[in-house]
Image (tube, helix red, strand yellow):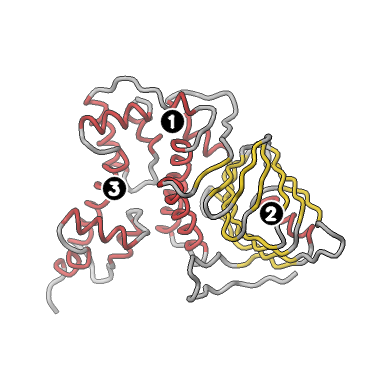
Amino acid sequence: MSLRTAKPDGNQAGPAPPPIILKTRDVDEAAAVLSTSAVPYRSELLGPSTSFSTEISGGPAWRSQLSYVKTVGAMHVKAELPHDSYAMVLGTAGELEHRVDGEVVCVSRNCALIQSPSQPVEVRTPESFELLFLRFDRESFVAELEKLLLRKVHAPLVFSPGFSTRTVAGKRVREMVATLQALLRQCITFDQRRYAASLETELIGLLLETQRHNYTRLLARRQGAGSWQVRIAEEFISSNAHLPLSLGDISLAAGVNARTLQHAFQSKRGYSPLQFMRRVRLQKVRAELSQASDACTVTSVAWRWGFLHFGRFAREYQMRFGEKPSETLRRSRPPA
């Protein structure tokens, strides 16, 4: 085994993986690391002369654990999550056929696997492959689901395992995972860690709302909501925009389930609760840039209010206020 810190490769087409935490030719050693950071599994090499080597990189973000695995060696793998975890498996190179409860999910660049607790998965891997694992604690999903529904849930939450990454939601998931990878490649500051928490919260909510599971029909139910509940939601968002809020948090504050709240916002305001939250955060950024100190930078303020994708932030800011954030900052400082 050898341990080292990976250096980002500036020539890579995609995001570089986080620092390497393990590089080994020992099958059991790799399984021991991945049992806690990704998915516990048992494996056997296919063929007596098959060589094996793997690199594992990653680390904890906030409430999730990200692992990037690059492996050589065909294997037969049987994996099962403990009862307290959910996992998402995304392909970065090659295609791996996963069998889950009689269903086949081909994990690739276009399709991910969502694995529910205690759900057995069987895989026969190709000679070489690369995968990304994102593992969450079960309580994060259940707590958000209960807030979205505005009720306690008792039956286990079970997702449909195949998740397309070619959809709008799927592309957003890919983007968020790439951002988490970028965060893990550097020394994470307090503001970045807070943003990681916000990102994970958004990811959990996105999966609950867009991927089929046994509570999907309940989530789709809609009731009535008054204008006063929309105002309560807006006040809650405005007062807490500095926190990693989820749609479930907003629904709980307004006292109405998520689908009803979204419909009420669209019909009464013309936008969603989360779109309103982005507007509030953009306004907070503008207020800070307008009264900035000499040490202030656009990037640091954007980070503080949850905007990590700088290109998108700059476009949204200019569309909203008619000027670039750098122009707001420059105008706030007296000429030298």
Crowdedness near tag 1: few (<14), some (14–19) or many (≥20) residues, C-alpha within 10 Å: many
Across and down, in percent, residue 34 comes to 69, 54
Q: Looking at the image, is 265 positioned above or below residue 18?
A: above
266 horizontally vs 85: left or right: left
Crowdedness near tag 2: few (<14), some (14–19) or many (≥20) residues, C-alpha within 10 Å: some
* Residue occupying image coordinates x 25% and y 46%: 280
Q: Which tag, 3 or 1, sits closer to the chain's start?
A: 1
Across and down, in percent, residue 264 comes to 27, 28
Kindly identify the amino acid type of the residue bearing the numbered disc 2.
Leu
Distance between the Cα atoms at labels 2 and 3?
A: 36 Å
Which residue is under mark 2?
A: 34
Distance between the Cα atoms at labels 3 and 1?
A: 20 Å
Kindly identify the amino acid type of the residue bearing the numbered disc 1.
Lys
Residue placed most toward the observer, 314 or 104: 104
Across and down, in percent, residue 96 comes to 65, 52
330 horizontally vs 125: left or right: left
Q: Which tag, 2 or 3, sits closer to the chain's start?
A: 2
Which residue is under mark 3?
A: 278
User: Element at badge 2?
Assistant: helix
Across and down, in percent, residue 211 comes to 49, 37
Residue at the extreme left of the image, as rendered: 335
Which residue is under mark 1?
A: 147
User: Element at badge 3?
Assistant: helix
